[in-house]
Image: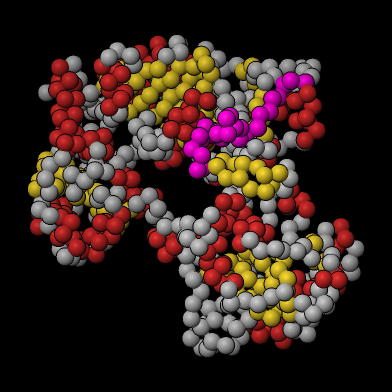
Amino acid sequence: MRVDAKLICKSCDEKLERITGDRCSMCSRGLAGNSSSGELCFDCLRWEGNGEWSGYLSNNISLFHYNEYLKEIIAKYKYRGDYALASIFIPYLKEMLRDIEYDLVTCIPLSVERLKERGFNQAQALADLLGLRTIEVLTRIDTEKQSKKSRHERIALPQVFHVTKNDLLPNQSILVIDDIYTTGTTLRQAAKALKKAGAKEVSSITLCR
Amino acid sequence: MKKKSISAPYSPELQNHLTGKHLLAFEIPFSKELLAEHLSNGYVSEACGVQSTNGSYHCVRCGNKEQTMFYTFPCKICDRDCTYCRSCIMMGRVSECAKLYRWTGPGIQFTIPDSVMSWSGTLSAGQQKASDRVVEAVKGKDEFLVWAVCGAGKTEILFPAIEAALLDGKRICLATPRTDVVLELSPRLKEAFPAIEVTTLYGGSAERHGFSPLTVSTTHQLFRFIEAFDVIIVDEVDAFPYSIDDSLHYAVDKSKKASASTIYLTATPSKRMQRLYRSGKLKAAIIPARYHRQPIPIPEMKWCGNWKKKLLQKKIPPAISRWVSERLEQKIPFLLFFPSIEVMEQGIPLFQMLSPNLKIVHSQHPERKERVMAIRNGDVPGLLTTTILERGITIERLEVAVIGAEHEVFSESALVQISGRVGRSFVHPLGTITFFHYGKSKAMIEAIDHIQRMNRAAWERGLLDA
């Protein structure tokens, strides 16, 4: 397959809005007017001002704005299960990955039930089509285990990830792949778990935000 | 109404849900155990949703055989490389490892009250004659065409036939390619047949469960049925996308029983259908006159120069501009049909200089329904539209113009349907239809010929008032 060739037509390509220009140096959010490039957006300032969360996720790169058009595509991809749609993002992701350095790449996992329901992990499919050799270092803590945690732990953003391969992480720069950066909670939870297990640095790449 | 067998070794609820259906597991809200039990007892059967013969895939639900519309992926459900159908994916993924279930147990017995129909309107002479023949047709297992001009009152023709079929214990489906038409038909059928359940199905509809003697559905939703209906009526049979999408024909065929009768309804049968009719292979009833017994207005052709170039130069061809201004002055609601969204969008700012309240409508427009409502209520003087509004709408006193009528999207049937929007009411049976063009097309001439032929036939059969 010619991965570098675009699989979508010009008019569909134009409907995908690339994130360009001034953006938050941490999460890739497009910055309007009052903040300039290189600064942090309001959300990231809040995350980084919170001792619980500060310093875990180095940065996130997103390719596109999560506009109505992309919402439709992602819904068809993820919820209807049209795996083939992953391939349309590959050329864009390849271009982005050229500038990123990392030692180990992994995907945000789905729960076992979700995976059995959908048939594939939408982040893993992207990595697979990119030809990346990913290592599964995270699993989702199932709800039963979560319910054993203290009330405080659950209310204050419970940790939903568990690190499975601790020995692989020390001194490594980890790249995490996911489809959407919404509030940043998922990726920060993953970053926190990975860093606590010894990772040197954690950054992420997502299709959209 | 439904008689349940008393000591049945099967679940009547599952029977009710699954009879005549062809569903994926997630569409069956019963436990896996119950389904498995019925499978082993032979009341339910299953089949792989995507199958391959000689290395070539086909989708058992939608009939897709186009190999580029299949995709193979590492499936975590079956832990193998698994192929799925992309063609019908919006209805839930059908793959090699996803099973389609159907009911193979005893059929549902249902009783119909003797006075099932409350409709008591009268049919015109032309309608009555056609209606009698449809009543005959639903008794057999043949195909039958009702070729009725726009405004003939096609739906009423069906009522006596639906009544007869219901009283005969038959399960009936009224299908159409267009959601708009489903939404319009459903309340009329519920009103005409208040004593029975009427299921209404379209993309996004809430009702999805259970057996009913009468179903109104988009042709698309029929993918979820198999050998269900004794009578299937396809309204607007030549409409997009049924006209070009073979999988929808597959859906209709799959949804009916081998012994079923099929009734097609349209004002503009395809060339193929017309040929079958002329050669006697397809029986048909023709209603050449409108319900109000006045002839259908004949379109006029008007040369308007190179409209494409003019619009690019940000000018409206003078003939068109005059036409619009006249209607704005006289407060006559109008539709301007454009060959494409692109040309229409070039035109709208120019037309809005004539009246800032003019609006556009196309298939992807979020306010489509509201805007059609607005012209009906007189809130908007006119609409610019693509062929999306060519059928299914009735607006009092409406007049229409086609911009670039020679363009290939304006087929004979599209032009006949567009013309059919005008003069539909008793009070205003007349009205202007103008085909603005830069060189006449064959389709334009054929459309006018079509309407004249129908008017002539109506005169000859005494269906028009002098």
Q: Residue at x 79, y 65 (%)?
A: A137
**Quadrant in which the C terminus of chain B appears:** top left
- State left or right for residue B407 relative to residue B127: left
Q: Residue at x 19, y 45 (%)?
A: B405
Asked whether A95 or B162 is in front, the reply is A95
Asked whether B302 or A139 is in front, the reply is A139
Q: Is residue B395 above or below residue A7?
A: above
Q: Quadrant of residue B58?
A: top right
Magenta-colored stretch includes residue B61 = yes
Asked whether B166 or A170 is in front, the reply is A170
Q: Quadrant of residue B122?
A: top left
Q: Is residue A115 above or below residue A49?
A: above
Residue A52: percent from left, percent from top: 79, 81
Highlighted range, magenta: B41-69
Q: Quadrant of residue B413?
A: top left
Residue B67: percent from left, percent from top: 51, 39
